[in-house]
Amino acid sequence: MGDIQSLRDHFIKILRFDATTGEFTWRARNENPAWSARYAGTTAGYLRSDGYMNIKTLRRSISSHRVAFLMVHGYLPNQIDHKNGIPSDNRIDNLRGCRSGAPNCCNRLLSPRNTTGFKGLSKRRASGSWDAKIKYQGEHIHIGTFKTKVEAARAYDKKAKEIHGDFARTNESLGLLPPINEGTSNDKNI
């Protein structure tokens, strides 16, 4: 099964994919009634320890999001991104192709080691001000220094949208920023 079209045909023959739920089920195999009686219609795949779903076929384990993308679109990009950051969510409208890992890397969730509560921020202990920084093409870019966390987080978001476009995972998209009220500042006590 060297070429992509043969691989796609194989998946379509053995799997049903529900694009709205991202779920896979095994199809019946006419050549193997015993297998069909046991597995046809059951969920295909298993959850890996890192949160991704895999399907075992052709004597190897294949990432379910790659199978879904190939079955629906007929090709495989270098990488596939889960828009919402949930690796087991293989709904087709949650998957998008990437040319390289760079766009996908900027789409990360807040690190569990984060101590500021926002992406891209660090606190200057001496002055109490907040630095906003972002990484782009292997370089750290200093966005600016701000009086409040919220100002710094909004500056980070603006820069992230500017350089990462649709792949930017911002503080706002993560629900970390309070809403902006017209004519008032929400930044005073944060």
Image (spheres, grey):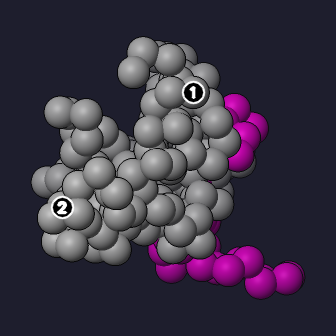
Q: Residue furthest right?
A: 183
Q: Which span of residues is magenta-colored?
A: 161-190
Query: 154 or 90, which lies in front?
Result: 90
State the image quarter where residue 148 is shown: bottom right
In this rendering, would 12 be left or right of 156? left
**Does residue 157 lie above or below 70 as drawn?**
below
**Magenta stretch holds residue 189:** yes
Say which residue appears at 50% left-offset and 17% top-offset. 3
- Which numbered disc flags the more N-terminal residue, 2 or 1? 1
Secondary element type, mark 2: helix
Amino acid type, label 1: Gln
Total tally of numbered discs in the picture: 2
**Magenta stretch holds residue 147:** no
Amino acid type, label 2: Trp
Name the residue that disc number 1 marks: 5
| Residue 168 image position (x, y, % from top left) | 61, 46
| Residue 143 image position (x, y, % from top left) | 61, 35
**Does residue 173 lie above or below 156 as drawn?**
below
